[in-house]
Amino acid sequence: MFKVISGLAVALLISSTSFAITIDEAVDAALKNNFEILASQHKVESSKYNVASAKTPYLPQLDAKYAYVKSSEKAYGTIEDEYSTISLTLGYNLFNGFGDMFNVKAAKSAYSAAKHNTQAIREDITLSVKKAYIDVLAAQDGIVVAEKAIQLLKNQLKDIKLSYEVGYVAKNEVLKVESELASSQQNVISAASAYKVAIFNLEKLTGADIANDEKFATLTDYTGSISDIESLKADMMKNRSEIKYLTELINAQKYSIKANKSKFYPKVNLGAAYNTYGEDFSPSDRGYAYDNETTLSLTVDLNIFDGFNKYNSTKSLQAEKMYMMSMLRNTKASMTLQLKNSVENLDLAHASLKASEKELASAQENYRITQNQFKQKVATNTDLMDARVMLTRAENTYNNAKFNIHRALADIERITEKKL
């Protein structure tokens, strides 16, 4: 079974009925082990704290300060050349053009966008694992077809050698089959290599080792068809994480623009302070004036001119928003094209499967008839080899069509983020 590489715990990928890994178990393992998901989750956590940080202006600000100054002159009274002070200041912003409110909303939208981005990554990984799993099953079937061809040729070689030994056929007829058998053995080697490569890819995606004798559960055949592409498109527009991600980024940008425009308004701050003074390092018992004081303040600040900084920064944010909106429109158009192509691929795979079923049935019957004719000395050695080639081709065509249906389904489910 799966042997986890890292310290992350992975549930045993064993089906209770077939003791074989299922496609859902492979996906679950990948989602638990994937470092890209972990990285995106840290990004979500960062965005969460940005929301909390954006809310801090709603709270009062408390500061403490100590200062000691010594001068070469008696600058702090008639006889003093040094002084010290401790200040405790409390400040609270009453109004800043609603900038704080819009900054919080921008941070919340960015936080939501980060979560949608994480979901998009999860969906991408799910698709990659599904296709990798399908590739493993396809490679397994490729080995079965190649080994079957080997067995058929071995049987044919046995028969043709008997015919050669009794002088019915020439030596070259034996050589033909031996040559074809050697070529088919190369096909088995290639098929086995393709299976290993498919396993390597699945291991990389799941973050786990896969035993050489591992078993994989077969996929349920999908016999349905897609007739209402507009319904799928509506699901795509509603569910797709990338669309939600860009939409939230645009919302965050809108709020950032409003927050930046708040700089055109005055800022009103309320303050209170307690100060105590001294004639040396100790800020107390000042002899020439009062020792402490308490102050209240109300300030109104308004920038008159800043070199067009607020204007230009607002225009920059607006241009960035337009860029994101264009990206959203382009993303929707690209996704619509992907959906159409995937539905077409599904229809093509269904049609190919239907045609390949006829091809396979005909090839099987043709091989059976030709084999009987060969044994009766009616069909030639070459006729039987040709029938075997047709059968192998038909089996591979059937398998390709069968797995292409599952690949197209995986694509459609990724595009719509909805289980079919």
Image: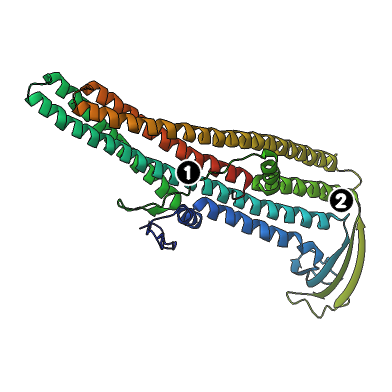
| Residue 183 in sight here | no
Q: Position of residue 247 (x, y in %)?
A: 73, 46
Residue nearest the viewer, comparing 102 with 183: 183
Coloring scheme of the render?
A: rainbow
Task: Give the labeled residue for mark 2.
Answer: 262
Q: Badge 2: few (under 14), some or many (20 or more) residues near its Cα, within 10 Å? A: some
Q: Is residue 282 above or below residue 258?
A: below
- Tell me the mark number nearer the camera, choosing from 1 and 2: 1
Measured in 3D between alpha carbons, the distance from the residue under mark 1 to the one under mark 2, in whole angstroms, is 50 Å
Image quarter hosting the N terminus: bottom left
Query: Residue drawn 72% across and 62% down?
Result: 52
CB within 8 Å, label 1 to label 2: no
Image-based side of 122 in relation to 95, left or right: left
Q: Badge 1: few (under 14), some or many (20 or more) residues near its Cα, within 10 Å? A: many
Task: Give the labeled residue for mark 1.
Answer: 131
Q: Disc 1 marks which amino acid?
A: Lys
Q: Is residue 221 above or below residue 155?
A: below
